[in-house]
Amino acid sequence: MSQESVIIYAVSDATGDLAVNISIAAARQFKELNSDLRRRSLVNTEEKIRVVVQEAKQESALILYTLVSANMRQALMEEAKAQGVTAVDLMGPVLNSIARTANLTPSDEPGLQYQMTGDYMKRTEDMSFTVKHDDGQGLSSLDEADIILLGISRTSKTPLSVYLAYRGYKVANIPLVRNIEPPVELKELGRDRMVGLTVEPEKLMNLRASRLKKLGRPINEDYASLEFIKEELAFQRRVFIELGNIPVINMTTKAIEEAATEILTALGR
């Protein structure tokens, strides 16, 4: 079955999380669709709007936007129309409906949900915990983690950890190394907070070769060898089973946001 492709620009005057999440949720409804998501955050001036719309036009992309400011929404709509780019306002209709129902005028200030509230302070604590428990650190307080990510090198453990911390979870990630037993602390914890990460061997080989090249090291090291990688993947599969057959997320073609959603679903969060 052939696959259709679409490039989606998720545009926001704040972090872009809402636009990204809606884009992912909508794209998932098309089984034959190969979507390429581009986040554009802090788009809060007319100049930034022009740049984003021009980028989208060059790639024949669709724009989904969550701009709080009515003026910025109008500016993007007009620029998109002038450039012949399809743009969908995800925020305006909701704000207008609430305003009419409540007979109130909405604030035009983006990012209000991230002000110094209790939630903000918790997010800061979660991020601090996650940084201190990156790459196998902080094992003495591993039991405080909400989520524990496991996987061999270059399976996106750190970026996923940071994203999940931003979503409000204390995350620890632990690298698995072939023929080295995982930390004993893991076996003392229940499987209900552990998730394994994997990547198809060919993709992992390319990722590692690129990493070695950036470090100025030869790309024919065992680290980027297909046979070596297959042995590592076999080892980590055994570890995942020994830890209670924990859920495993295949990161080969997934965006961080999509993988994070799958992790939370697998853990019942």
Image: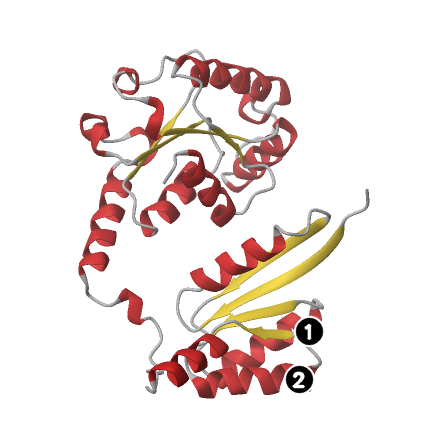
Q: Quadrant of the N terminus?
A: top right
Depth order, front residue of 261/239 = 261
Mark 1 surroundings: few (<14), some (14-19) or many (≥20) residues within 10 A = some
| Residue at image location 33% in from the left, 79% down from the top | 109
Q: Amino acid at mark 1?
A: Lys
| Residue at image location 39% in from the left, 69% down from the top | 14
Badge number at residue 81: 2
Q: Amino acid at mark 2?
A: Lys
Mark 2 surroundings: few (<14), some (14-19) or many (≥20) residues within 10 A = few
Q: Is residue 198 above or below residue 213?
A: above
Q: Is residue 128 left or right of residue 70?
A: left
Q: Is residue 52 left or right of residue 181?
A: right
SS for dot 1: helix
Badge number at residue 9: none
Depth order, front residue of 248/127 = 248
Q: Which quadrant would residue 203 be assigned to in this image?
A: top right
The residue labelled by disc 1 is 57
Percent from the top left, x then y, of residue 92?
48, 79
Q: Is residue 157 above or below residue 127?
A: above
Q: Nearer the viewer, mark 1 or mark 2?
A: 2
Percent from the top left, x then y, of residue 224?
58, 27
